[in-house]
Image (spheres, grey):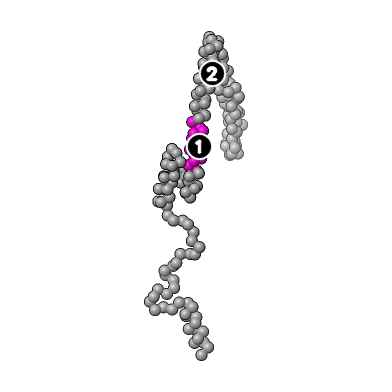
Amino acid sequence: MSDTEPTTPEPTAPSDSDALGDAGKAALQAERKRANDAVRALNAATARLKEIEDAGKSELEKAQARAAALEAAQQQAAQEIAARDLALTRFKVGTAEGLPPNLIERLQGTDEESLKADAQSLKALLPDSTPSPFPKADPSQGAAGDGKQSTAQQFAAFAEAALK
C-alpha cells in the first residue's frame, strides 16, 4: 500500500449537491474525512507491522523476501506484456484481413497463425461489402425483353415523329 492519501470525487451534478442541503453536505464531508483518516491509519499500521516482521528477520531472510517480491512482480509484468502482445497481434491480423473493428476483439487464438485462421473463417461469414464502381442493377427498371423500348429508343421515336 502506498502512503498517499486517497482522493474522493466531488459530486459533479449540481442537482445532487442541491438535494443534500447544508446538513447533508456537512455530513458527506465528515464521512469523507473519516474514510481518509481510516485509510491513512491502515497504511500506517501496515507499515508498522512490516517493520515489526522485518525486525526479527536476518539479512538473508530480508533479501529472500525482497527477491520473492521482485519475482512475483516480474511474473505479473511478463503476463501483462504477453496479454498486450496478443492484443496487438490480434489487431494486426484483424486489420490485415479487413475485419471491422468490432469483430477484431472476437478473434480467438494464442499465436499469429491461429488468429489468422480464425480471422479468415470469420471473414467468410461476413457479407461482401466491397463497394463496386457502379451501382447494382435494378431489375424493375429498363427493358425486360417484353417488347418495351428503352428510353433512348422512345426518344428517338418521338424525335422522328416530331420531325415528319
Task: Name which residue lies at 54% across and 15% down.
Answer: 63
The N terminus: image quadrant: top right
> Please, is residue 151 above or below residue 25 in the view?
below
Residue drawn where x is 46% and y is 46% of the image? 103
Q: Position of residue 144 (x, y in %)?
A: 40, 73
Q: Residue at x 49, y 35 (%)?
A: 83
Q: Which residues are magenta?
A: 79-91
The quarter of the picture where residue 10 lies is top right
Q: What is the secondary structure assignment of the residue under circle 2? A: helix
Q: Which residue is mark 2?
A: 66
Q: Position of residue 65 (x, y in %)?
A: 52, 17
**Amino acid at the residue labelled 2:** Arg
Q: Nearer the viewer, residue 84 or 47?
A: 84
Residue type at tag 1: Asp
Residue topped by disc 1: 85
Q: Is residue 98 above or below residue 24?
A: below
Residue 49 visible somewhere in the drawing: no
Residue 52 position in % (x across, y down)? 54, 11
Circle 2 packing at 10 Å, graded few (<14), some (14-19), many (20+), is few
